[in-house]
């Protein structure tokens, strides 16, 4: 029992940071890259005086570089959930702030296929409850910081009137600091440092999207996506020993997502809304996994969306295009399952070159 609880605590901690801050990033990156690619291609064609073929050295299309600074804020409510084998866990509410910078370089190789390079650095902080077994005498608090690096490749397939397929393979490296404090009635508080804890996350993702024009300004976009995530946790803390660390551990998660997005464009303004659902196909309940293949262009850089195996998702937002400069975007996203509810606000700037 002692080993089981120790592993639960450590797996929870590792999953909170690793998947929250790593595996979702490509969704926003691909969507922004696609928007910037379109804008940059139009500018390129204007610069080439409307010639059908780019100048020598550009291949099938121009190399498009996009820089995307983002800020994310998320909040989750108190959690109480059964994670299998009779184990019920709880946590107080919490909130997180994350700042990140995305860099992509994309090259259309043919009319059908574009290949892109993706890199992101993110720094996040979380303040909230410590996840513990649901016992009346246990409680706690966490203050967590994470530095995260993600690198990988993006492959976009343009299927014309049949839609598009967006794929990625990403590798993330995260390191943590901060501390957690466990409170147990009648026992001195236990405080452990997260410094030295790290992880590496591999993400494989594929999203199919079809943009269907309803009118000159309104577009409906059904989507269906799959993500497989593999995470390895290193130097996990041992709550039973103030200086010891546990051996490395690993876990898989398989996630399925589907939904519908509506986009309304009016001059430089674009309004959008989304409804969808996410399901963790993996049978084992792995609490804290925050990565969700939510939808193309929707990222959640926060904690706790995957506590429930099935969640509903929704979102609204708007963007404003500044000619010859870039795009400003503000969006809200919600996630709700049987055991958890999360609200997230994202502010983004998109600068194509």
Image: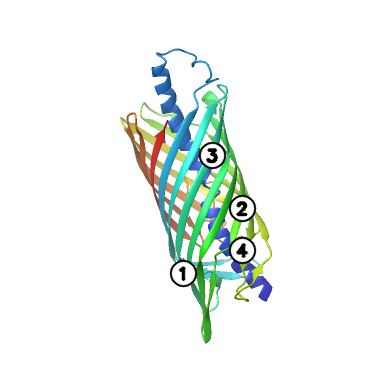
Query: What is the CA distance from the residue labelled 1 to the residue labelled 4?
Result: 18 Å
Whether residues under marks 2 and 3 lie with C-beta atoms below 8 angstroms apart, the answer is no
Q: Quadrant of the N terminus?
A: bottom right
Q: Which label was assigned to residue 118?
A: 3
- Which mark sits nearer the N-terminus, 3 or 1? 1
SS type, badge 4 = helix
Q: Residue 256, image x and y in percent?
A: 58, 46
Query: What is the CA distance from the residue labelled 4 to the residue labelled 2?
Result: 13 Å
- Closer mark to the observer between disc 4 and disc 2: 2
Q: Residue 260, image x and y in percent?
A: 47, 40
Q: Which residue is mark 2?
A: 200
- Which mark sits nearer the N-terminus, 1 or 4? 4
- Closer mark to the observer between disc 1 and disc 4: 4
Q: Which residue is mark 1?
A: 92
Q: Which label was assigned to residue 11?
A: 4
State whether residue 229 is above or below residue 155.
below
SS type, badge 1 = loop
SS type, badge 3 = strand
């Amino acid at each position: 029992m002692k080993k089981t609880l120790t592993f639960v605590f450590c797996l929870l901690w590792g999953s909170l940071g690793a998947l929250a801050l790593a595996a979702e990033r490509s969704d926003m990156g691909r969507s922004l890259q696609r928007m910037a690619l379109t804008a940059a291609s139009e500018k390129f064609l204007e610069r080439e005086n409307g010639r059908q073929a780019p100048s020598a050295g550009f291949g099938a299309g121009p190399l498009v570089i996009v820089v995307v600074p983002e800020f994310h804020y998320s909040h989750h409510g108190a959690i109480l959930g059964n994670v299998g084998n009779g184990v019920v866990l709880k946590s107080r509410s919490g909130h997180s702030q994350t700042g990140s910078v995305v860099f992509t370089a994309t090259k259309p190789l043919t009319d059908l296929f574009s290949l892109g390079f993706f890199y992101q650095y993110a720094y996040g902080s979380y303040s909230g409850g410590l996840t513990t077994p649901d016992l009346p005498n246990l409680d706690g608090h966490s203050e967590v910081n994470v530095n995260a690096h993600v690198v990988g490749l993006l492959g976009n397939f343009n299927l014309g009137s049949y839609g598009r397929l967006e794929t990625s393979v990403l590798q993330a490296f995260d390191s943590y600091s901060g501390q957690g404090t466990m409170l147990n009635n009648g026992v001195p508080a236990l405080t452990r440092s997260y410094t030295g804890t790290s992880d590496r996350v591999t993400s494989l993702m594929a999203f199919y999207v079809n943009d269907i024009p309803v009118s000159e300004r309104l577009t409906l976009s059904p989507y269906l996506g799959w993500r497989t995530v593999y995470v390895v946790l290193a130097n996990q803390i041992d709550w039973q020993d103030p200086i010891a660390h546990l051996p490395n551990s690993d876990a898989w998660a398989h996630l399925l997502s589907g939904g519908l997005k509506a986009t309304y464009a009016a001059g430089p303004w674009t309004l959008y809304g989304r409804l969808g659902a996410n399901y963790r196909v993996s049978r084992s309940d792995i609490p804290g996994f925050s990565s969700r293949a939510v939808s193309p262009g929707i990222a959640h850089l926060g904690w706790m969306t995957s506590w429930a195996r099935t969640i509903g998702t929704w979102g609204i937002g708007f963007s404003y295009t500044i000619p010859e400069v870039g795009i400003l975007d503000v969006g809200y996203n919600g996630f709700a399952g049987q055991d958890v509810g999360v609200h997230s606000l994202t502010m983004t700037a998109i600068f194509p070159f």
